Image (cartoon, helix red, strand yellow):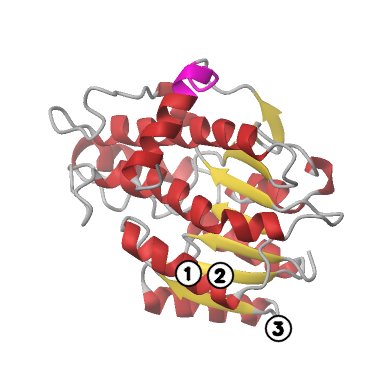
Amino acid sequence: MRDKTCLVTGATSGIGYETALGLARAGAHLVLVGRDGDRLDRSGDAIQAVVPGARVDLYRADLSSQAEIRRLAAEIRAACPRLDVLVNNAGAIFDRREATVDGLERTWALDHLGYVLLTLELLDLLKASAGGAFSPRIVNVASAAHTRGRIDFADLQGARSYRGMRAYAQAKLGNVLFTYALARRLAGSGVTANALHPGVINTGFAKNTGGVLGVGWGLIRPFLKSPADGAATSLYLASSPAVEGVSGRYFSRCRAVESSSESRDEAVQERVWSLSLEQVGRT
């Protein structure tokens, strides 16, 4: 990955940090995005301590805010002459319904629309970086939770009924639907897009939860995979020659597997694509 520029969101801990570290070890130029500036600085320092000489650029942004995403993308376009890998990883689960500055339910806004808007804002840069032996890659960290999700078009924002796990599963289904719709549109561009399940990982992912969901997460935490294990499939899709040119697939444990039947419904993919573009003002 030497001379490749790789952007990783949610890079201050867990899977995002381990993905960034693995890419640094492979020689990549890192562009790391995190919400907390202090934690972002510590992550950058930690990577450079493990990989002396690693090139690490840090950008702070709250990816639940569309204005922040647009600002971030503008800064990256101005600073980076190329972008070879975009790893959309940032996300969280919330046990209480919260609205973002854009008036959107926070899980959908961060875990799904954050992927959509950042990808679209950087798509021209990714396309401009195509043409060599390495095709630029979009890697969307989804989850097997998507198999329990459905897109509730009548109450997408959870205004009438909200449950944290249901909102999360819906957003992760959104990731897979978006990936498939995007891959169709990228055919022939030299840019690929794939989604993945990282496994159930022992990270700070559920720190925003309490009640039954928080207790349940605490009980299973000792039995979960490590963040380094969880980053394996993200790293595989970001860097392996084995997936050069592969696009529009869903991976688990570094293998292409079948996603849920709803995620493979092209009509649902197109409806979510159109709705998502409308919600981020890209119609």
Residue farthest along the left direction in this orientation = 160
Amino acid, disc 1 = Ala
Q: In this view, does 108 lie above or below 11?
A: above
- The answer to whether residue 84 is left or right of residue 58 is right
Q: Where is residue 110 in the image (x, y as percent from the top left)?
A: 35, 50
Disc 3 versus disc 1: nearer the observer: 1
Closest to the observer, 206 or 188? 188
Dots 3, 1 in contact, CB < 8 A: no
The residue beneath circle 1 is 74
Q: Is residue 93 visible?
A: no
The reply to whether callout 2 and callout 1 are in contact (CB within 8 Å) is yes
Image x and y of residue 280, in percent = 35, 47
Highlighted range, magenta? 262-269
User: Is residue 52 left or right of 115 when viewed as pictured?
Assistant: right
Q: Residue at x 61, y 36 (%)?
A: 185
Instruction: Determine whether the residue tagged by mark 2 lies in a helix, strand or loop.
Output: helix
Q: Which residue is drawn at 55% across and 75% down?
A: 78
Q: Which residue is drawn at 56% across and 70% down?
A: 77
Q: Which amino acid does label 3 sit on?
A: Pro
